[in-house]
Amino acid sequence: MKQFEFSKRLKQFPPYLFAEIDKEKVKLRKKGIDFIDLSVGDPDILCPKSVVEILWRSAKVKVNQKYALDQGKLPFKLAIKKWFKKRFTVTLDEHKEILPLIGSKEGLVHFPLAFLNPDEYVLIPSPGYPGYRGAAFFAGGKVHYMPLFSENGFLPDLNKIPHSVRNKAKIIYLNYPNNPTTALAHREFLHTLVRFSSRYGIIIAYDNAYSELYDKEKPLSILQIPGAKETAIEFHSLSKTFCMTGFRVGWACGNEKMISGLFKVKTNVDSGIFGAIQDAASYALEKENAYVHNLRRTINARRGIFIDSLKKKGFTDIFSESTFYVWVKLAKGTSSIEFAKRLLVHQVVATPGVGFGTYGEGYIRFALTVDEKKLKEALRKI
Ligand SMILES: Cc1ncc(COP(=O)(O)O)c(C=O)c1O
């Protein structure tokens, strides 16, 4: 029988680096052994109760049971506009500069299909969220990795991007608050980034999925930087802010043409977001500010406990400025996969840094997505 080969496009994807860890997890589960999972970026905390009530109520409305073939409900876009203005003092046009998404990943990955031509480069941070690489491959582009080093505050050195690459680059993906390094981008860097992107005609695809998960310093939006609306699109998510990962809802905002390009792609791919989810998301943005405040408090308390304990265990390079992750440098020469496997023996699961790209090697990422009791139990085993 004829063998069906995967497409050249799909074959470009490197092997799945977490396969071994996943296999071990399955083995433990089969043996009935309980483990503490600090590997997944999915909060253990329930989303606001009111959000579920709105979802339930809205699901019964006939119009919500039908195709949502539009650019998003106007009340949802107005809720985004109001939230954005309050949070970042940036005014967005609800008709032209906001596009609801089926989770931010959906928009981040579809976006290059609207602007990238074959042989053009996508600039991607390493370590970084794996979705960006997939986005570039699916759109037939080339990838240039920008290393993120701790000495540089985990910001890319734009001067190090070769001229041959920057002249053929179309999109730069950046993500602050950063997964996995937890770093924030300061205003000066963002100014430099906007200048760089307008000089070389490179679109900034700014992933702000963790904008509300910070400790001391409030993260910025790229759209707060003068000139950014000419060159940038920003992606937001309700997944982490309101612990709504399963709902699949977020939005893109910024440059009008970029929004319209992404919308055109989406009209050919999906058929809108379930109306009841849009209603629930609007409610969260408008009414659940106190929930986000409490979520931050909970995560910050967990962060304190985790970092103190890691320091006592002798770890020195611990990064946890924002998000709900802790990014830890391992002893020189330690492979992150080997370290993760060692933790697994003690029934603790963490993510090896190399899974986020070559420059993530030598680090391990812990997600503070279990309660304090479990966290302390995990710490006893690390
Ligand atoms: C950096 C980053 N961006 C985007 C996403 C996607 O979030 P969602 O699609 O749930 O909005 C994630 C998920 O973990 C992430 O870590």
Image (cartoon, rainbow, N blue to C red):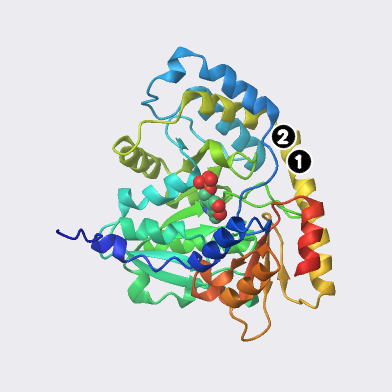
From this viewpoint, which residue is outermost toward the bottom?
333
**Residue 303 visible in the shown view:** no
Report the residue marked by disc 2: 289
Which image quadrant is residue 121 in? bottom left
Q: Quadrant of residue 99?
A: top left
User: What percent of the width, then of the height, locates residue 25?
Assistant: 58, 60
Residue 360 in the image: state x and y as whole percent. 56, 72
Q: Give SS at disc 1.
A: helix
Residue 230 visible to the viewer: yes
**Amino acid type of the residue tagged 2 in the rendering:** Asn
The crowding category of the residue bearing disc 1, from other C-alpha atoms within 10 Å (few below 14, some 14 to 19, many at least 20), is few
For label 2, the SS is helix
> Foreground: 216 or 220?
216
Taking 289 as reference, is 344 above or below it? below
Q: Nearer the viewer, residue 244 or 213?
A: 244
Check the image and name the residue furthest to the left.
1
Q: Position of residue 112 (x, y in %)?
A: 35, 53
Of residues 133 and 34, the one nearer the viewer is 34
Contact flag, marks 2 and 1 (Cβ < 8 Å):
yes
On-image quarter of the N terminus: bottom left
Q: What's the distance in space between the residues labelled 2 and 1, CA to CA?
A: 6 Å
Left-right relation of 27 to 93: right
Q: Residue furthest front?
A: 31
| Local crowd size for mark 2, using a 10 Å CA cut-off: few (<14), some (14–19), many (≥20) | some
Residue 355 at x, y percent in the picture: 52, 68
Amino acid carrying label 1: it is His
Please identify the quadrant where the C terminus is shown: bottom right
Q: What residue is rendered at 51% in x and 62% in y?
A: 193
Residue bearing mark 1: 293
